[in-house]
Image (cartoon, coloured by chain):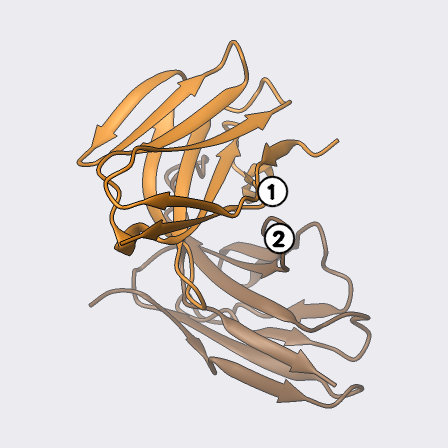
Amino acid sequence: DGGITQSPKYLFRKEGQNVTLSCEQNLNHDAMYWYRQDPGQGLRLIYYSQIVNDFQKGDIAEGYSVSREKKESFPLTVTSAQKNPTAFYLCASSIVTGRRNNSPLHFGNGTRLTVT
Amino acid sequence: QKEVEQDPGPLSVPEGAIVSLNCTYSNSAFQYFMWYRQYSRKGPELLMYTYSSGNKEDGRFTAQVDKSSKYISLFIRDSQPSDSATYLCAMRIPSGSARQLTFGSGTQLTVLP
């Protein structure tokens, strides 16, 4: 079955440590995204990538970094510079048709990161 | 003021009830409207995807867009306990960038057997 796989499902880290969240998709989608979800708030865009070896900052990129070396993979690193890293992190992907990207997002099942 | 407002609930209804979930928005440039369902500790899954104004029906679900009022709705007929989830609205302007996708904060729905 095609889909998006995020791992691990739960992640615990000590404050001051960097941590990398994995996201892999086999949907052959060009674009991939990372969102953060906090209780009572909508999804907020961290980073997105529309093509391999290129990515753009979203609305809350500070303290995060990404890479897009392969079409299928878009890992997110939460660095020690992120002041409030405990959250539910969602990876998504979508088709890019021509120069427009109006297709809906398909999401993975998320990684819950807890930093103490 | 948030660009997209959604009543967070929680909303509890008895099985078989008609459910109405709503979002209001302020940006008149939004043209694409989506509803996602998110079960606890899972990622959102796409329920409905509509362009511009009008209604779209899929089984027990109907999405309605009223651009003149900047108001979208999701109706669930004959609600089931399996419909218990958080429902997120999302909308975007026609663009080549994902930045223009904006989500509501979600409405938590519980359907009681």
Q: Mark 2 = which residue? A: A45
Q: Is residue A2 left or right of residue A98?
A: left
The residue nearer to you, when weighing B48 against A91, is B48
Contact between labelled residues 2 and 1, with CB atoms less than 8 Å apart:
yes
Q: Position of residue A58 (x, y in %)?
A: 66, 51
Residue A96: tell me if it is visible. no
Q: Mark 1 = which residue? A: B99
Q: Residues within 10 Å of mark 2 (few under 14, many from 20)?
A: many
- What residue is drawn where x is 52% and y is 48%? B10
In the rendering, which numbered label is found on residue A70?
none
Quadrant in the picture for residue A34: bottom right
Q: Secondary structure at mark 1?
A: helix
Is A64 drawn above or below residue A107 in the view shown?
Answer: below
- What residue is drawn where x is 49% and y is 38%? B90
Q: Position of residue B60 (x, y in %)?
A: 21, 36
Give the chain of mark 1: B
Q: Position of residue A42 (x, y in %)?
A: 60, 48
Which chain is displayed in brown in the rendered image? A
The residue nearer to you, when weighing B80 against A65, is B80
Q: Is residue A38 left or right of residue A51?
A: right
- What residue is drawn where x is 27% and y is 55%? B82
Which quarter of the rendered picture does the C terminus of chain A lie within?
Answer: bottom right
Q: Is residue A24 left or right of residue A76?
A: left
Q: Position of residue B99 (x, y in %)?
A: 60, 42
Marks 1 and 2 sit apart, C-alpha to C-alpha, by: 7 Å
- What residue is drawn where x is 64% and y is 51%? A41
Indicate the colour of chain B: orange
Is B27 drawn above or below residue A43 in the view shown?
Answer: above
Q: Amino acid at mark 1?
A: Arg
